[in-house]
Each structure stands twice: as C-alpha cells, then as structure tokens.
C-alpha cells in the first residue's frame, strides 16, 4: 500500500489541473477514511507538473483585471485566481511530502490534507465559473512566480509556514472581501458566491498555518513572534501591505502584534 507522502508526490506530478484537484480530494478522503496506513517518505519534485497552457509570464505582461459588467476583466480575475488555487493544491501536497521526515503528529497531516482538499475544491469551483463565462483555465497567460515561495522555503518547514500560509494566504484574507464587494456591485453574484466559499475556507488555512508554526516554535524553544518576523524578513521578498483584514486574521488566531510592524504604508 502506498504511503501518504508518495500519494502527495503523485498529486504534484499530475499535470492536468482538474485531475490534480480531484486527486487531492481523493487522497484527503482516503486519509480521513483510514485507507492509508502510514505517511512514509517520498521526495517531491522541485517543481510541480503543469499543463502546456497557460503560458507563464511576468505579472506586468498579464491582462488587466478590472471588475466591471464586461466579462473580460472578470474572466481575467477568475483565471488568475484559478491559477493561484492550482498552486495552492501543489503547496499543500508539497508540505505533506517534503517534510515527511520531520516527525510530525497525525494532526499535522489531517490539517494539510484538509487544505489540499479545499484548494482542489476552490480550483474546481473557479474552473466551473470560468466555463460559465466562456473561458477555460489555460486560455489566458498566468503569473510565473507563484512557486518561488516554495523554492525559497524548501529547506525548512518553519520558514515554509512563516511565508506560505502566514504571508501569502493571509494576504488573500485582506483582498478577497474587496473583490467580493466589487463583484456584487456589478451583479456577478455567482462569482461572488465562489469567492465567499474560498474566503471562509482560507481563514481556516491561515489558522492551520499558525497552529503548526506555533507547534514547531514550542518544540524548538523559539519565540513565535520574533521567529516569524525574522523568517519573513529573510525569505519573503516583498513588503507586507496594508490594509490588513485584522478581524479575519484574528479569527485565524493570527494577531496584529505579529505583522503590523513589518507593514509598508
Ligand atoms: Fe484556496
Ligand atoms: Fe488556502
């Protein structure tokens, strides 16, 4: 029987996006159903498998995402979000496989499989909504830099948790309500409803990131706040941007003391 780490590698090695998303959901269900006997160990690829389309470009070369009644801007927005969710599936699979020698409790795997499953759901919801707008994932170019954070933090689970859930996914909590409001304002309630699902789930992902960040700090005898700030300064190239969604971050157990002093205005 194949262990969990090897199955996570299989997710990473699946190129077709809907198949990747469905496999992530199936692996999570199998894990929850006690069909996978052990975590085992496996080496994830340096980069996940991807389809031939979309072409990957620098952010400046991507289509504008102005949200109005026309479908072009909303399509570009949903396409960009689908690309982010596809990366998020791989990030969750990577965290399961890459750190499988770190002696982590079963709860760690329970949590990251929940994340993988929900990222798969997010991708499929966005792909479905794109289809209703006459588009498919791959029709537009996409951001080429999303795997950088994974490479930058591949050496250490604590660094990975500091940056991926607690900078990147936390940033999603700041910007998603604004997008939902803009979609509602142009009566795109179907797209707004998809983003509502994502927003609620992502509060949970930040909470999971924080829980395991704290767990590792305790195990290593480190101060969580100082350690997080030092790791973000070292491994995150950008600046943390205001305004923060302090309410959602607090719901995720991530207080402003951690991030406020690292922010640019
Ligand atoms: Fe997501
Ligand atoms: Fe997420």
Image (cartoon, rainbow, N blue to C red):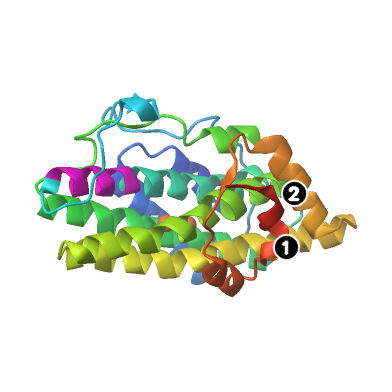
- Residue 75 vs 258, above or below: the answer is above
Q: At 54% across and 53% down in the image, what residue appears?
A: 242
- Residue 136 vs 220, above or below: the answer is above
User: Is residue 210 shown in magenta?
Assistant: no
Query: What span is colored magenta in the figure?
Result: 72-81
Q: Whole-Å distance between the Cαs marked 2 and 1? A: 10 Å
In the picture of the structure, the residue carrying the numbered disc 1 is 257
**Which structural element holds mark 1?**
helix
- Residue 21 as seen in the image, left or right of residue 90: left
In the picture of the structure, the residue carrying the numbered disc 2 is 229
**Which structural element holds mark 2?**
helix
- Residue reaching furthest to the front: 265
Q: At 41% across and 29% down in the image, what residue appears?
A: 144
Report the label total. 2
Q: Dividing the image into four equal quarters, which quarter contains ligand 1?
A: bottom left
**Could you say which quadrant of the image residue 120 lies in?**
bottom left
Q: Is residue 262 visible?
A: yes
């Amino acid at each position: 029987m194949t262990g969990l780490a090897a199955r996570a590698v299989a997710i990473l090695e699946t190129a077709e996006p809907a198949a990747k998303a469905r496999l992530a959901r199936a692996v999570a269900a199998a894990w929850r159903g006690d069909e996978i006997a052990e975590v085992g160990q496996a080496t994830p690829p340096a980069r996940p498998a991807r389809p031939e389309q979309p072409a990957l470009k620098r952010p400046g070369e991507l289509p504008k995402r102005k949200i109005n009644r026309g479908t072009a801007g909303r399509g570009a927005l949903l396409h960009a979000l689908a690309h982010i969710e596809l990366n998020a599936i791989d990030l969750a699979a990577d965290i399961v496989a890459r750190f499988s020698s770190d002696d982590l409790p079963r709860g760690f795997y329970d949590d990251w499989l929940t994340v993988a499953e929900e990222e798969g759901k997010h991708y499929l919801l966005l792909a479905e909504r794109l289809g209703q707008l006459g588009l498919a994932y791959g029709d537009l170019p996409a951001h080429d830099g999303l795997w950088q954070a994974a490479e930058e933090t591949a050496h250490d689970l604590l660094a990975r948790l500091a940056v991926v859930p607690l900078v990147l996914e936390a940033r999603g909590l700041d910007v998603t309500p604004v997008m939902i409001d803009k979609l509602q304002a142009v009566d795109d309630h179907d797209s707004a409803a998809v983003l509502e699902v994502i927003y609620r789930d992502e509060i949970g992902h930040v909470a999971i990131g924080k829980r395991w960040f704290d767990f590792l700090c305790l195990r290593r005898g480190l101060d969580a706040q100082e350690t997080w700030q030092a790791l973000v300064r070292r491994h995150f190239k950008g600046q943390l941007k205001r305004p923060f969604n302090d309410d959602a971050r607090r719901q995720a157990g991530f207080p402003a003391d951690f991030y406020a002093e690292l922010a640019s205005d």
